[in-house]
Amino acid sequence: MKILMLSAPFPYPPTRGGTEVRTFNLMDYLRQRHEITLVTQRQPVVTDEEIHELERYVTRLEVFPPGRGNSGGGVLGKAKRFAEFLRDGCPSYVRSYQQPHMQALIDREVATGHYDAITCEHSINEIFVRPEWRDRLNTVIDVHSSVFASCRQQLENNAAINPLRERLNLPLLERYERQHCQKFSTIVATTPEDGVQMREFSQHSQIHIIPNGVDLSLFPFRDADSIPANNHRLIFVGAMNTVANIDSAMFLAKEVFPLVRDRYPDATLSFVGTSPTPEVKALEAIEGVEVTGRVPSMVDYLHRSAACVLSMRIGYGIKNKTLEALAAGVPVVASDSGLEGLSVDGTQDGQPVPLAALRANTVPEYVAQISRVFEEADLRRSLVIHGRELIERSFTWERAGQAYEAALLGQPNR
C-alpha cells in the first residue's frame, strides 16, 4: 500500500507531545510493510538532526516551513479571527497551519493517482484535504479527540478559561467538525465516546476505534514491592501549557494537595512535563510542590513516586499519561476523564474487571484514594500488576498499528 501521510506537527522525536507520540508510532508500524510519503512542517524547535533522523522512518519526507500563523494579537486580532471563523467555518488554530506550497505539493501528489490512502494525523490536517478526493482513494482522518466535544465538556465542567468565548465557539465548532468529517471515507477515534460523536457527524464514514499505545521498552515495569511504605511522593505528568493540564494542575495543587498534606506532612507533589506556564510555575509557592519542566527521563520520575494523580476535569480521548503510568508500575488515581477509554474497574461484557486504577472526581474522593495508596500495601501491589497486564493486553503500539493498517486498507472495523 502507498500512503500519503499528512502531519503538520513534526512527528519527531516521539517524546515531544501526545500528537507526535501517536503519529510517530503508527507511522513506525506502517513503514514495515508499506510505502510512506510524509508531508510535514518544520516548527522552530525542530533541528536538522531530527529531520535526518525522521528520514529513516519513511520512504520520502517533504518538510515545509510553518503555516501562516494567526493574524495579529490583541482585541482586534481576536475579533478578526472570530469573524473569519464565523464567515469561513474554519477555526483560526486550524487555519494557522495553512501553507500554500505544502498544499500545492499535496494536490500534485494526489493527482498522480500513485496513492491508495491519504491520512490526516490529527484533525488539524483536514485543511489540506479536498472533498472530491474521497471518490479517488481512501481518505482517513485520525481525529485524536473531538474539538466540539472537548469544548462542550469544558463548559459543562465550568473549566473554560473564557466561558463567553467558548459558548460563542461551541455551535461553530459543531458546524466545523460536522462539515469536515464529511470529507473522509474513514474516521479514526481513540475512544468509544469519541466514536459515537464521529458517527453522529458522518453517517457514511467507516468509524474505527483505535486507542493509543505504550512503548514498553521506554516504560519498564516497577514492582510494587519496591515502593517504600513511607513514600508519599505524588506526580502529575504532561505538557504543562495545555488548557486541560493547567486546569488539572491548579485543581490538584490548590484544592486536593493541601488536604493530603494535612494527613501526610511529608507528602510532595511534582508536576513533570514540558513548557510550564507562569501560572503553573507559581504553584511552587505551595509547600511540597515541585514544577520540573522537561526532564531527561519521565520514567525515572514515575518510578520514584508512590502514585500518579491525573486530576483531569476536561479533555476528550485516551490519555497517554495514564497508559504510561500504568505500564511503568505506578498506582494511578484518576478522574473519569483521565481513565476515559479504559476498563480499570467494574465490569466489561458482563465480566468483572480487575482493579487497575482508582477512580476519583471530587476533592474528598482524591484524598481518600491517595490515602489508600499510601497505606495499603496489598492494594498497591494489585494495582500495579493489573495495570501493567491491561497495557500488555490491550494498549501496545503494535496492536494500534495493526488496527490502523486495517483501517487504511478499508477493512471493516472489528
Image (cartoon, grey):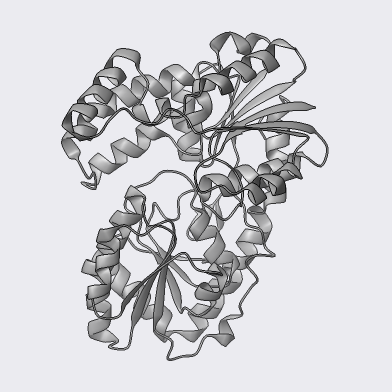
Q: Could you say which quadrant of the image residue 374 lies in?
A: bottom left
Figure check: 202 above or below 239: above
Instruction: Tell me the residue at 29%/73% (across/down).
Output: 367
Position of the C terminus, as image quadrant, is top right
Judging depth in this view, the residue of 384 and 230 nearest the camera is 230
Image coordinates of residue 287 in percent, x first then y, are: 25, 80
Q: Is residue 40 left or right of residue 275?
A: right
Total numbered labels: 0
Q: Is residue 83 left or right of residue 245?
A: left
Residue 354 appears in the figure: no
Figure check: 73 above or below 176: below
Residue 270 appears in the figure: yes
Q: Residue furthest right?
A: 33
Q: Residue furthest front?
A: 48
Judging depth in this view, the residue of 30 and 367 nearest the camera is 30
Q: Is residue 122 left or right of residue 393?
A: left
Q: Is residue 294 left or right of residue 81?
A: right
Position of the N terminus, as image quadrant, is top right
Judging depth in this view, the residue of 106 and 256 nearest the camera is 106
Instruction: Tell me the residue at 65%/71% (across/down).
Output: 220
Image coordinates of residue 297 in percent, x first then y, are: 56, 70
Figure check: 125 above or below 362: above
Image coordinates of residue 272 in percent, x first then y, are: 43, 67
Q: Could you say which quadrant of the image residue 24 lies in?
A: top right
Image coordinates of residue 276 in percent, x first then y, are: 36, 60
